[in-house]
C-alpha cells in the first residue's frame, strides 16, 4: 500500500474513532441522566409515601377525618403515577444501557482496527528503512571491494 494511501486510511480511522468515542460519551451521558431521573422518581415516591403516614386521634372531627382520607387518596394517586413513570424511566434506562454497550463495541472495534493498521504501518516503515540500510551497506561493501 502506498504511503499516501496508508496515511489517508489511518487518518480516516482516527476520525472514525473520534466519532465513535463522541457517540459513546453521549450514550454514557444519556444513561446517567436517565438513571438520575429514576432516582428522582424513587425520591419522590419516598417523600410522598411519608406524607401519608400520619394518624388522627379519636378526638379529630368528622370533617378532618374526611379531609384526611381525601388527602391520602390524592397523594396515593400521585404515588401511583410516579411509580408508573419510574417503571417507564427504568425501561428507557435499560434501552440506553443496551445502546451504550453497542456504542462501546463499535468504538472498540474501530480502536482495534486502527491499532492494527498503525502496527502494519510501523512494520512497513521498518521494512523500508531496512531496505535503505541494506542498500547503503551493499554500496559500501561494493566500494570497499572495488577500491
Image (cartoon, rainbow, N blue to C red):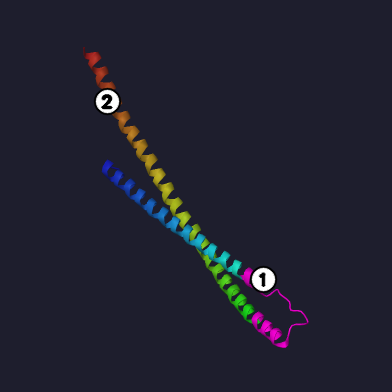
Q: Nearer the viewer, residue 113 or 34?
A: 34
Q: Residue at x 50, y 62 (%)?
A: 33
Q: Is residue 79 above or below residue 135?
A: below
Per the image, the residue denoted by label 1 is: 50
Between residues 22 and 64, which one lies in front from this camera angle?
64
- Residue linked to disc 2: 135
Occupied quadrant, residue 61: bottom right
| Residue 54 pos. (x, y %) | 71, 75
Q: Residue at x 73, y 77 (%)?
A: 55
Q: Earlier in the sequence, mark 1 or mark 2?
A: 1
Q: Above or below — where is 26 with respect to 53?
A: above
Residue at (30%, 25%) from the top-left corner?
Answer: 134
Q: Position of residue 3 (x, y in %)?
A: 28, 41
Q: Is residue 98 visible?
A: no
Given the current orientation, which residue lies at the most extreme bottom position?
Answer: 62
Horizontal side of 24 relative to 47 (left or right) equals: left
Q: Quadrant of residue 83?
A: bottom right
Q: Quadrant of the N terminus?
A: top left
Q: Is residue 11 left or right of residue 44?
A: left
Q: Which residues are magenta?
A: 45-72
Helix, strand or loop at label 1? It is helix
Graded by Cα atoms within 10 Å as few (under 14), some (14 to 19) or many (20 or more), the crowding at tag 2 reads few
Which corner quadrant holds the C terminus?
top left
Residue 91 image offset from top left, x and y in percent: 55, 68
Foreground pick, 137 / 20: 20
Majority SS type along the magenta span: helix
Q: Residue furthest top?
A: 147
Amino acid at each position: 500500500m502506498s504511503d499516501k494511501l496508508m496515511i489517508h486510511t489511518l487518518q480516516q480511522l482516527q476520525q472514525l474513532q473520534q466519532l465513535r468515542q463522541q457517540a459513546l460519551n453521549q450514550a454514557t451521558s444519556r444513561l446517567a441522566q436517565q438513571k438520575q431521573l429514576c432516582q428522582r422518581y424513587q425520591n419522590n415516591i419516598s417523600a410522598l409515601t411519608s406524607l401519608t403516614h400520619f394518624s388522627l386521634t379519636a378526638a379529630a372531627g368528622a370533617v378532618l377525618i374526611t379531609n384526611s382520607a381525601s388527602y391520602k387518596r390524592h397523594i396515593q394517586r400521585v404515588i401511583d403515577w410516579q411509580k408508573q413513570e419510574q417503571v417507564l424511566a427504568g425501561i428507557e434506562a435499560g434501552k440506553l444501557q443496551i445502546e451504550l454497550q453497542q456504542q462501546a463495541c463499535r468504538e472498540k472495534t474501530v480502536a482495534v482496527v486502527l491499532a492494527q493498521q498503525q502496527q502494519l504501518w510501523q512494520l512497513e516503515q521498518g521494512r523500508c528503512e531496512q531496505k535503505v540500510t541494506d542498500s547503503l551497506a551493499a554500496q559500501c561493501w561494493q566500494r570497499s571491494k572495488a577500491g
